[in-house]
Image: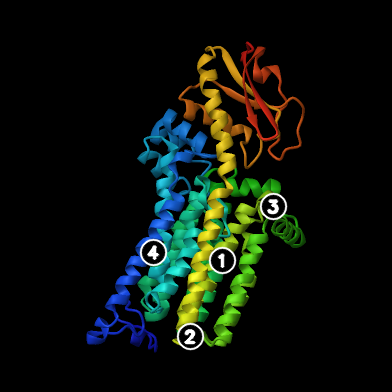
Amino acid sequence: MTESDPVATRTSKHDRPLGTPTGREGSAVSSSSRHAVVLLVLCCLVVFAAHFRPWEVAYLEEWPLARDWDTLGPLGFAANYLHWTLSRPLHLVPTMLGLALGDGWPGMIFLVLAAVAVLQLLAVVWALRPVSRSAWLNIAVGMFLALHPLWPAGYLQRFLPAQTAALGLAFALGMLIRWLVNGRITWLIGGWVTLLAGLATYPGPALVAPLASLVLALAIPASWRRRMATVVTVTAASALMTFYSLVVTKFISPDAPSYELGNIQHSAVSSVKQLVVLVGGTLRRDGSVVVLGIAIVVLLAGILVLAAAIPRWSGVLIAVAAIASPATTVVFFGNTGWLSDIDRISYVISLALVPPLMVWPLTRKESRPRLQGALAALLVALSGIGGLFGVLHWQPYIAAQHKLLTALGPIVREAGKDEIVSVVDRSGTLGFFPSFPEQYLGPASVVWNSDNTPVWLCFDTSSALPSGASVCESKDTGTTLRLAGSVQLGKGTADIYIGKREKE
């Protein structure tokens, strides 16, 4: 027995959108429904194509993961990374699925990434369905999440866990909307479990989720009891995952701190001021598109209110939530480096803008349909353009990796069993993100060239690169070096040497 609610009385047990025509009236909109299905299918194809790029093979962490999968096997792989993922136990599950599908080839991780992105679109459309009658608006908001125009890093395999967490959040929000509408406790429990699974994959949305629950609770007509239960339940899920990561894991593995706790012990921010300065500096330096995205959402709210397309309070809610979205970056307080990383900062801000955008179809009026349709089309277009630039952003770095790895092929095959191959970079291109951090070059060569010859990256002189570049020393490069090849990269060359390993 659920409490009386005016919204619940208008909603069927099948979560039919409010006001959906029935009987003969329904036949009048069948053509429109077919158009919506065709549009949704086309959008799914676009999202899939943007994320499924197996020809790129891998980029960063996927190289050692693929090597270890091939060397250790699935069970050995899981055991090897058990401690590293203890604080986020589902972190590598999506990546392992991709490696399993590709029989160890990392290119198939893109298949999982593409599937997750498509499911994000479908999750948003499904989430809004109990309340919103506009399939076009629902799809537009879903495309913003699935194409993440403010977050180029979402097109990389390394952020597959983050994408999976975003998918979990989207489905959880759909369950919470159904709880708010009809009061069935099973939806509230389902949302809690789904959100917790997402956070166990990647805890980045731990602050986005409570903000999203508050926004939706205020947007949907429901009793204050349900609204409070929604926010408390979601906040409890985030708090529970945080408690597990920082406290419970200490008892499970007392000898070594978890990933999150280890970072907090060594690199946490020291004050609120430092956090604000770091986030502000990152947005000012690298996040102009993110700031523009926030401004566009605020502007959209103003236009919709002035056009009487949504209530004034909805416009205020959208604008305030959008402006508050940078506050979700607090989740990265454990490492000052994370707060200086635009890929992480833009992830949570972009994700936090989805709930304000959901308020639009949830509270829209029937007035000004053409204007609303045009704005929805503009949102889809901007998402598509942002997504295209997101994919293109990484292509020069990936091309440079492939060029170097291809050049290494005949050289590693030439090297003897007691020899090592060294890449001496003189181009200022390698050794740091986003080009080729040195710890990934060796595993990448093993996977790309199917050759276990050790490959080392070093520099003639010390470098101030963020990754901490290594000066070439004989203990690493070997002795009696001979030049085996050179690769033109950027403004200089990377010379490739073969040397004999020093005897220990």
Disc number placed over residue 340 in the picture, else none: 3
Label 2, secondary structure: give it: loop
Question: In this picture, is 384 found above or below 335?
Answer: below
From the viewer's side, name the closer residue of 415 and 224.
Answer: 415
Residue 57 horizontal/vertical position (percent)? 47, 38
Residue 217 horizontal/vertical position (percent)? 50, 78
* Residue name at image x 67 percent, y 35 percent: 490
Label 1, secondary structure: give it: helix
Question: In this picture, is 10 found above or below 454?
Answer: below
User: In this image, 255 relative to 134: left or right?
Assistant: right
Residue topped by disc 1 = 352
From the viewer's side, name the closer residue of 220 and 302.
Answer: 302
- Quadrant in which the C terminus appears: top right
Q: Amino acid at mark 4?
A: Leu
Disc number placed over residue 201 in the picture, else none: none
Mark 3 in CB contact with mark 2 (< 8 angstroms): no
Question: In this picture, is 407 found above or below 22?
Answer: above
Question: In this picture, is 488 found above or below 223?
Answer: above
Earlier in the chain: of badge 4 and badge 3, it is 4
Task: Please tell me whether mark 4 or mark 3 is closer to you in this view.
Answer: 4
Residue topped by disc 2 = 368
Q: Amino acid at mark 2?
A: Arg
Cα separation between marks 4 and 1: 18 Å
Label 4, secondary structure: give it: helix
Residue topped by disc 4 = 122
Residue 426 horizontal/vertical position (percent)? 71, 28
Q: Residues within 10 Å of mark 4 (few under 14, many from 20)?
A: many
Task: Please tell me whether mark 1 or mark 2 is closer to you in this view.
Answer: 2
Q: Residues within 10 Å of mark 2 (few under 14, many from 20)?
A: some
Earlier in the chain: of badge 1 and badge 2, it is 1
